[in-house]
Amino acid sequence: MDIIDLRSDTVSWPTPEMREAMANAVVGDDVYGEDPTVNELQAAAAAMLGKEAALFVTSGTMGNLTAVMTHCQRGDEIILGREAHIFLYEAGGSAALAGVQASTIPVEADGTLNLESIRKAIRPGGNPHFPHTRLVCLENTQGSRAGMPISAEYTAQVGELAHEHGLKLHIDGARIFNAATALGVDVKALVAPADSISFCLSKGLCAPAGSLLVGSREFIDRAVYTRKILGGGMRQVGVLAAAGLVALRKMTKRLGEDHANACRLAEGLATIPHIEIDPTAVHTNMILFSINDDTPIAPDELVQRLREDHNIVIGGYSNGRDKIRFVTHYWITPERVDTVLEAMRELLA
Ligand code: TLP
C-alpha cells in the first residue's frame, strides 16, 4: 500500500468501509432479480441521477456496449467523438458485437462536439444508400481533454438536436460525479437530457468493480436482455454492489479533494524544469503534460526510475497518448503529491 499509482483512478483500492460492507452483504441470485443489495444499489443510482431505473453491469465498457446494443440495430450508425473512449479504448466492441458503424467527429478543446458537426453527421432518411443514424454519444468528463467536465447547458443542446432528429443520446459518464463536483451542479442536471447514462463505481469512487447503466424503465428492461447476451448476468453479486453503495453514497461527496490534489500536483509540476504543462487546464482529477526534448532523462527511463527507486507508478507515453497522464484519486493524498513532486524534481533537475 506504499505504492503511489498515478496511472489512472481505476487503480484505486476499495476503502476499509467497502471491504466491511462486502463481507456483510446480504445477497441473492441477481439473474432472478433477487439480490437485495444489487436492487438497493440500482434504485439508489436511478434516484441520484433522476431516472426511472438502473442496471448493475461489470464495467464501463459493458455499460456503454449494453447501451449501444439496446438503442441500435445492426447496421445503424452512431455519432461520437474521434477520441471518445467508446471509439478508442473499447476494443471495437460496438462494431464487433453491436454491429454499428461509428461516425466520428472532432472533439473540441473544451471537450464538446461541435453542434453543427453533429447536425451534418446525421444521415438523411428515406435513402437506402445511407445507414440509419440512431444515437449520439457524449463523454463526461472527457478523458482526452484532461477530464474536462461538460456543462448541463451544452448537454441540453445536444439532447434537443438528437431528439429533433429522432435520435437517442447516451452519455459515457464514467466520471460524471467528477463533472458534477467540478461544475458545482447536481448530477441530475448533467444527465437530464440523456436517454441513457453509464457511470463507473470503480474509478475515483474506489469500488473494486462495477458500473451502472441508467435510463427509463422501458430501456433498462430491454438492457437486461442485452446484458445477458453479453454474459453479464451475475449471481450473488451483492458483494460487489455493497461496495458500490458506499461508492455512491460516500465517495461521490469527496471528489473535490482529488481535484484539489490534481491542482496541487499540476502547479508543482509547472515549477520543475523540462515539464510542459498548463496548470489552468486542470478541471477534475486528470493532468496531461509533456517533457521537452532536452530532458536529462528519457521518458521511458523516468517511468522506470520512478517505479524502481521511488515506488511511484506512472503510465508514460503509453496507450497511444502524446502526453503523460497523471490521475489523482482517494489514495493520492496531499503528502503523496509532494512525494511525487520531490521525486520528479530529483530526476529531471
Ligand atoms: N478508462 C480507463 C482506460 O480504459 C483508458 C482509464 O484508465 O481512464 N469510459 C471512460 C471515459 C473511461 O475512461 C473508461 C475507462 C471507460 C469508459 C471504461 O471503463 P471500464 O474500464 O470499467 O471498462
Image: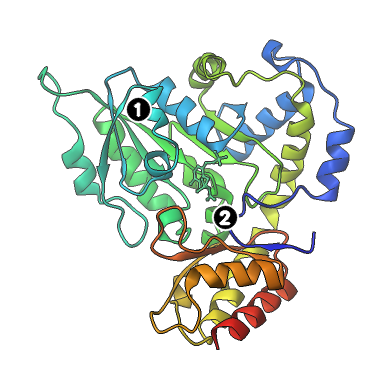
Q: Quadrant of the C terminus?
A: bottom right
Q: Is residue 9 left or right of residue 101?
A: right
Within 8 Å of ligand 1, the CB of disc 2? no
Q: Which mark is residue 95?
A: 1
Q: Quadrant of residue 193?
A: top left
- Vertically, is 77 above or below 153? above
Tell me, yes or no, whether the two marked residues, 1 and 2, touch with CB atoms within 8 Å. no
Who's the residue at 63% across and 71% down the image? Answer: 306
Residue 18 as seen in the image, left or right of residue 106: right
Q: Nearer the viewer, residue 150 or 143?
A: 143
Left or right? Give the position of 221 relative to 108. Answer: right
Q: Which residue is mark 2?
A: 178
255 to 229, vertically: above or below: below
SS assignment at label 2: helix
Query: Which amino acid type is shown beneath numbered disc 2?
Result: Asn
Q: Amino acid at mark 1?
A: Ala
Q: Nearer the viewer, residue 130 or 52?
A: 130
Within 10 Å of the Cα at label 2, are there few (<14), some (14-19), or many (20+) other Cα atoms?
many
Residue 5 x %, y %: 66, 61
In this view of the protein, which residue sits in the foreground, 184 or 231? 231
Judged from the image, the secondary structure of the residue bearing numbered disc 1 is helix
Label 1 beta carbon less than 8 Å to ligand 1: no
User: Where the N terminus falls, by quadrant?
Assistant: bottom right
Name which of mark 1 and mark 2 comes first in the sequence. Answer: 1
Residue drawn where x is 88% and y is 41% of the image = 20
What is the x, y in percent for residue 340?
A: 65, 75
Count residues near mark 1 (Cα–Cα under 10 Å), then give few for <14, some for 14-19, many for 20+.
some
Compute the Cα span from label 1 to label 2: 29 Å
